[in-house]
Image: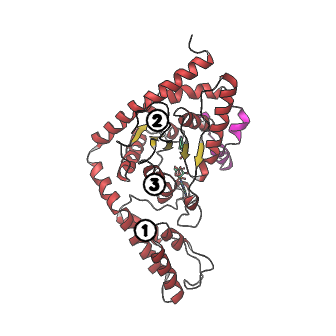
Amino acid sequence: MASPSQPTSQKKRILSGVKPTGKVHIGNYLGAMQGHVNLQDDRENYIFIADLHSLTTVKNKAELQELILDLAMDYLALGLDPNKAVFFRQSDVPEHAELTWVLSCLTPMPMLELAHAYKDAVAKGIKEINAGLFTYPVLMAVDILIYKPDIVPVGKDQKQHVEIARDLAGKFNRTFGEVFKLPTPYIPEEVAVVIGTDGQKMSKSYGNTIEIFASDKALKKQIMGIVTDSTPVESPKEPDTIYKLYSYFANDDEKANLLERYRAGGMGYGDAKKMLLEKVIDTFKPYREERERLKNDIAYVKDILKKGAEKARIVASETKKEVWDKTGLSI
Ligand code: ADP
Ligand code: TRP
C-alpha cells in the first residue's frame, strides 16, 4: 500500500472502526466488517478497534481486554490483511483523545442531545448516562477526520454520526482554516439493516443475533430459535426471516430452490432453518478455522495491532500538528 501520509490522489482512503462490545454477529459482518475487508485491495484502508468507545459501557478490565483481542482475531480471521490495511487500536493512537477535546470545544450541546446513542440511552431510561456516552459522537468525528478519509463505510445506524463528523469538520474549517476533509458515509443498501432471529434489526442489545464464531451447538440454537409466524410455510405473505437470512449467503439458484420448496408444500420451518444453518456453517467454515488458529497465537495478534498503530500515528500526528498550528496551540 502507499506509505501512510495524507491521502494520495491514486488511491481512495477508506476508514472505519468497530466498537468491541460483544460477539460478532452476521449484522456486524454484512453491515460493516465484510465491506472493510473487501475494500482493502484497491483502497488505502484504515480499520481500527474503537476501544475508547467501549469504555462508555464496559467497566471491567478483564472483560475489556478480552473484547479487544476477540475483535482483533475476528477481523483477522475474516480476512483483514495487515499488509494491505492499517489495522490498529484507537487507544494506541493518543491523538484521537487529544483532538476530541479540541472538537468538543466547537460542538454545540443540542447537536449531542439529538445524537441517537444518547437519545436511545435516555429513551431506555438508563439512569447513569456518563459524559463519555454524551460526547461519543465527538470522539467518533475525530476518529474519522484525523485520517482525512474519502469514504467511511458504516451501517445505517451510524450515518448520523458521520453526518456529525461532516458538520464538525466544516465548523472547524470555517473557524480556524481548512484542515479537515468532509467525509462521505458509504452504506451498502442491500445489507443496510440485517434482520435478526426475531425479524427486527439484528443487534447484541436485542439478543437476536447469529454469531459467526459461536460453537456449532450455540449457532444451531440461535438459528433453530428463529421466530416464525403461524402462516404455513408454503404460503408466506412475504419472504420470511429464514428466507431473508438465507438470501444473504445463497446464490440466485439456491434462493429460487428454497422458494420452490416452500411453494411445493411439505416443508416445515424446521427444514428451512436446517438449510440456513448449513449455509451459515459452510460460508464461515474457513473463517472459523482461522479464528481457532489465531486463538493460539495472541502474541502475533498483539504485534499486528502495535505495528498498525505505528503507521496510523504517522497520519494522526500530522493532522494534530495542523490543528495545533491553526488553533494557536502551537506557539
Ligand atoms: P450491535 O447493534 O449488535 O451492538 P454495533 O452497534 O456494535 O452492533 O455495530 C457494529 C457495526 O456493525 C456498525 O458499523 C453497525 O452499523 C453494524 N451493524 C450492527 N448491526 C447491524 C445490522 N443489523 N445490520 C447492518 N449493520 C449492522
Ligand atoms: N460508533 C461505531 C459503532 O458503534 C464505531 C466507530 C467508532 C466508528 N468510531 C468510528 C465507525 C469511526 C466508523 C468510523 O459501530
Q: Which residues are magenta?
A: 106-132
**Drawn side of residue 272 relative to residue 331, left or right:** left
10 Å neighbourhood of mark 1: few (<14), some, or many (≥20)?
Answer: few
Residue drawn at (50%, 84%) of the image: 260
Mark number, residue 221: 1
Does residue 104 sit above or below 144 in this rendering?
A: above
* Residue nearest the observer in this picture, 47 or 90: 47
Disc 1 marks which amino acid? Lys
The residue to which callout 2 is attached is 90
**Drawn side of residue 94 relative to residue 107, left or right:** left
Q: Nearer the viewer, mark 3 or mark 2?
A: 3
Q: Can you see residue 106?
A: no
Measuring from the top left, give residue 197's x and y in whole percent: 52, 66
Tell me, yes or no, whether the two marked residues, 1 and 3, touch with CB atoms within 8 Å: no
**Drawn side of residue 82 relative to residue 142, left or right:** left
The residue to which callout 3 is attached is 34
Q: How far is mark 2 from mark 1, CA to CA?
A: 34 Å
Q: Earlier along the polypeptide chain: callout 1 or callout 3? A: 3
